[in-house]
Image: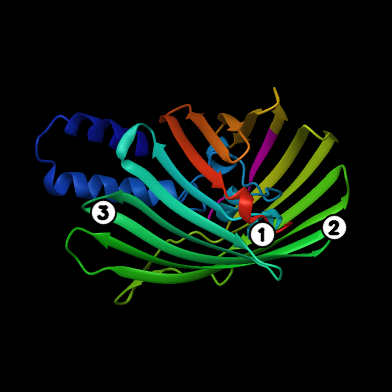
Amino acid sequence: MTYLLLNTLKDCQSLRRRGLLLVVIIGLLCGQILAAQTTLFQSPTTAMLGTPGASEKGEWAFFSNPAGLAFLREPVATIGYQNDFNLKELSSATALLSYPTKALNISGGYLRSGFEHFNTQQLSLKFSRIMAPWLSLGVGFSHSMSALGASEQDKITTMDAGFRLMPNSSLVFGFYTINPAQTKWRKHEYESYYPSAVAASLCYLPHEDLNIEFSILKDIDNDPLASLKLEGKAANAIILRGAVSGKPLRLGFGAGLHLDSLHFDMAMNHHRALGFSSAFGISYYFTNLSRNK
């Protein structure tokens, strides 16, 4: 069904006015896409590759395990853009800011997905802390607003939480949950789907520049999704990433260029029926404000 809807939408793109038909099609697509992912934005280091990234650390942990934000040692400003299946109506943009203090890391973000007639906006605030050399914890709160045409907005507030455990220098175990209360969009007496999921990852680091991650993601309304991700340094500042996940089978590829203060990350994946999706992000580290100084 989604494949037929996508073909219909691509045909309609040549029309000057899409009108109500376009709104309905996008609404159906967004509902089906949300059923296949647990966040409104798929980061270029994890979700866009097809993995939940429960062992992730750094600024992009904002969209997976908030415990990974605790490892940021200086303020970081990040912007990102995601596109599904080469359709601008199925795109998302985000802006993030993380600020580490002596007590904890505080991160905030704004996200907008969709287009003029059907869109969702989200404001999030997340807190994380390193509790011990082997343990970090994180928790976050998000307020989302969804609008369809000129109708009244739907609003929802959710939370997420996670931990990251590193028993030794070669193993990392991460776990997080999104919307554990299973809160749903509600308008009048009706309820509709909002992601509620748990994810776990086991990451093995045979070398400091190479890691292999096996993950399981379980959405409350869908079958478990398994993925395998490989990430390693190809050169001093270049990082290559690859992942495979299923069902359905999806292949993801990505790369990062990490300079001293400026990081570029990008990724794309391929769905055998729907085609390519992509994401990229730019992060700036304020190294002169490092918490280590």
Q: Secondary structure at mark 1?
A: strand
Sequence-wise first label, 3 or 2: 3
How many other residues sit within 10 Å of disc 1, few (<14), some (14-19) or many (≥20)?
many
In the rendered structure, the answer to whether residue 292 lies left or right of residue 272 reads right
Span of residues in magenta: 221-229
Q: Position of residue 79 (x, y in %)?
A: 45, 46
Circles 3 and 2: CB atoms closer than 8 Å: no
Residue 276 versus residue 21 in the image, above or below: above
Residue tagged 3: 118
Quote the CA–CA distance across marks 3 and 1: 29 Å
Q: Any magenta on residue 60?
A: no
Q: Which mark is residue 176?
A: 1
Sequence-wise first label, 1 or 2: 2
Q: Which mark is residue 134?
A: 2
Residue 251 quadrant:
top right
Circles 1 and 2: CB atoms closer than 8 Å: no
In the rendered structure, the answer to whether residue 249 lies left or right of residue 86 reads right
How many other residues sit within 10 Å of disc 2, few (<14), some (14-19) or many (≥20)?
few
Q: Position of residue 29 (x, y in %)?
A: 34, 45
How many other residues sit within 10 Å of disc 3, few (<14), some (14-19) or many (≥20)?
many
Quote the CA–CA distance across marks 1 and 2: 16 Å
Kind of residue at badge 2? Trp
Residue drawn 61% across and 35% down?
245
Q: Secondary structure at mark 3?
A: strand
Residue 20 versus residue 135 in the image, above or below: above
